[in-house]
Amino acid sequence: MMERKRRKTALAAAALAAAWIVAGCSVLNPYRGDFECPQMEKGKCVAVETAYRESLERKRLDPAGAQGKGDGASGAEEAWRKEAYAALAGMLQKPKAPLVAPPKVMRVLLLPYRADDGELYMARYAYFIVDEARFVLGERVTPEALGTAGEE
């Protein structure tokens, strides 16, 4: 009787293990397995390989299409695109983002010494922040402005 119960338990465990092996990690995957294109109005729903081939074909047939001239864009869209590219080019050429000068940290070597109570302190380094980090606004970016003059 006990042998039969043990055999049933082993069979159930084997069935669960087989189910786990067949299902693999899909049991634990929180994401859906079907990748549909829910927003068809924003473009074409094709496989990655197809999209890549189409982009290569489009560049080969119409080199201007890479800049958006061959896709039938209206004059207003084309003007907006040119203005957006010009604004982006201006930001890249002359950024208005400030630079941050890093803090100046000084490392001091403390040589071995014996304290008044007879304890021996071995050599070690102590670090001190001499200058805090700061923004460099409108200044020329030089070692002096960054606070790194004379450092190696």
Image (cartoon, helix red, strand yellow):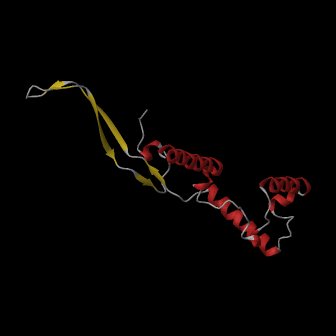
Q: Is 134 situated above or below 87?
A: above
Of residues 113 and 17, the one nearer the viewer is: 17
Q: Quadrant of residue 109?
A: top left
Q: Is 149 situated above or below 64?
A: above
* Residue 67: percent from left, percent from top: 80, 60
Looking at the image, residue 39 sits to the left or right of residue 49; the answer is left
Q: Quadrant of residue 74?
A: bottom right
Q: Is 103 situated above or below 88?
A: above
Of residues 39 and 81, the one nearer the viewer is: 39
Looking at the image, residue 10 sits to the left or right of residue 133; the answer is right
Q: Residue, x 38% and y 46% (percent of image)?
A: 103
Q: Give the residue furthest to the right.
A: 61
Q: Residue, x 82% and y 58% (percent of image)?
A: 66
Q: In which quarter of the image is the C terminus?
A: top left
Looking at the image, residue 27 sits to the left or right of residue 34; the answer is left
Of residues 12 and 7, the one nearer the viewer is: 7
Q: Is 129 situated above or below 75?
A: above
The mark total stands at 0
Q: Give the residue furthest to the left.
A: 117
Looking at the image, residue 128 sits to the left or right of residue 67; the answer is left
* Residue 36: percent from left, percent from top: 73, 65
* Residue 52: percent from left, percent from top: 81, 53
* Residue 39: percent from left, percent from top: 72, 70
Q: Residue, x 71% and y 61% (percent of image)?
A: 35
